Amino acid sequence: MMRLVPIVIALIFASRVGGAGRQMQLPNESGLSAAAQLAAAVPSEFEQLLTRYHFENDGTGRKEVVGKIRILNATGVLRLGEAVFEYQPLSEELQIPYFRVKKKDGTLVSVDTDITQERPNAVPSKREYGERRIKIPDLSIGDLVEYDAVTIIHRPLGRSEFYVDHSFQPSGVVDEQLEVDIPRDREVRVKSIPTVRPREAINGTRKVYYWDNQNARTHPVRAIPYAPGGMPDVQISSFLSWKEVGRWYEDLEKSQRAVTPEVKAKAEELTQGLNSDFGKVLALYDFVAKKIKYLNLVSLGVEGYVPHAASETLQKQYGDCKDKVALFSALLEAEDLRASSALISPERDVDLDFPSPWPFTHVITTLHLGKEEIWLDPSPAGVPFRMLMPSLRGREALVIPLHGVPRFETTPMESPISNSWLEEVEGEMHDDRTFEGRVHITARGDVELPLRQAFIGAIESVWPTTVQGVVKGIDRKN
């Protein structure tokens, strides 16, 4: 989850167009050969892209990315004006041994790498996100941009674990390599696509895996590197079973969902006068879903998996999916209701033969009320009680009971709320052919989600515009 190279590539290959999998079409009006047209369309390319991982048994380590980017035309000069490197300050340290430009005459020009700048719209807790923005001045066609970026991993994933997911660039690379260096006696699982099978080498107490991307050549850039849900080209995981993955997340979450006096008091306030478990769960869900603002805070390093403490999320009134689930679980526990977190993804598929954290990008909640198991997602504010978004239905989820055995379950395929849309119009048609009246819409099920999301979180002054859009849609439909 350390996104160094992809950020740079996003700047270089901004010429991606069209839908997923479509290739850029070049008009053949210039009289140039197909190869010449192609070269003119690619603004820059990696002459070398080397990614190295080095892990110790305790899960600490480093990731190094060495790149050489050739500027091919004026578009490349314009687009490679800035490089952005992200890192997680609480668990990582970013070092850039060099960033330089080799001019066509062989002159080396060093670029200042000491300027640190927060990204636009930085998250509320700035200490959880860091980035280095490097301005690259005075580029010219034919220049070679060279850099070495190192991320030191001080805090491992937990329980001395590590994993790597890596996908090679689909285009714009002449020479691309991946190396993963681990202790010789450490048992890991390794999986890669057939076209990039690894080589192994033993070096004393270390074992090194090597991959070469043999298919990386300059050709039209696709819209996205690989389809959503597709597996990475290379995966290495120190997790040997899904039970280990579940225990790992349980360790990260357990202390963060503690019932503190503040959490206990809030649960009592929200459930005052309610006697049924169902009523209590509904009240607590409504509070977390609607009153705790969802923010996608951190996606790097171990901090991308560790929730904030429930009491902190309650105090700050915002959090991401894992923060909201931890708070929801703590509130439930304060009322003697036991909930399990469930790791899931709306787009990534689970490979049951390869345990790792990679397939999971979201956290939801499941609990038993009487004999019934219910699934809840308190993250989006506009989702009704017991409903999951369509993208989360019928998906494999790793359920992690507190003090229980992690297991896979499939989320319900159907929504518990049937779809319905009722329009009631009352009014009067005037002589000037204008209509004055009221439109009453009752929507349930999936069709109500867009309406809920349009109003929740929006400034009240824009509600009339939202309603006008809905009414115009009705008018066009009729």
Image: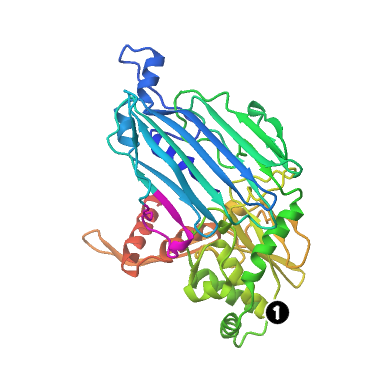
Instruction: Reply yes or no: does residue 121 show up in magenta.
Output: yes
Location of residue 97 (image quadrant): top left
Residue span colored magenta: 116-132
At a point 31% along the width and 23% down the height, the residue shown is: 105
Q: How many circles with numbers are drawn on the protein?
A: 1
- SS at mark 1? loop
Q: Residue furthest front?
A: 204
Q: Is residue 290 left or right of residue 77?
A: right
At a point 73% along the width and 67% down the height, the residue shown is: 402
At a point 51% along the width and 57% down the height, the residue shown is: 298
**Above-or-below relation of 294 to 109:** below
- Residue 27: tell me if it is visible: yes
Q: Is residue 167 left or right of residue 109?
A: right
Q: Position of residue 216 (x, y in %)?
A: 52, 25
Mark 1: few/some/many CA within 10 Å (<14, 14-19, 20+) = few
**Above-or-below relation of 46 to 261:** above
Q: Position of residue 63 (x, y in %)?
A: 56, 44
Q: Residue furthest bottom?
A: 273
Instruction: Reply yes or no: does residue 53 show up in magenta.
Output: no
Q: Position of residue 299 (x, y in %)?
A: 52, 54
Q: Looking at this view, is 459 or 313 the one in front?
A: 313
- Residue 13: tell me if it is visible: no
Q: Looking at this view, is 313 or 106 the one in front?
A: 106
Q: Position of residue 12 (x, y in %)?
A: 39, 35
Q: Looking at this view, is 3 or 448 the one in front?
A: 3
Q: Amino acid at mark 1?
A: Asp
Name the residue beneath numbered marker 1.
336
Location of residue 283 (image quadrant): bottom right
Q: Is residue 391 left or right of residue 450?
A: right
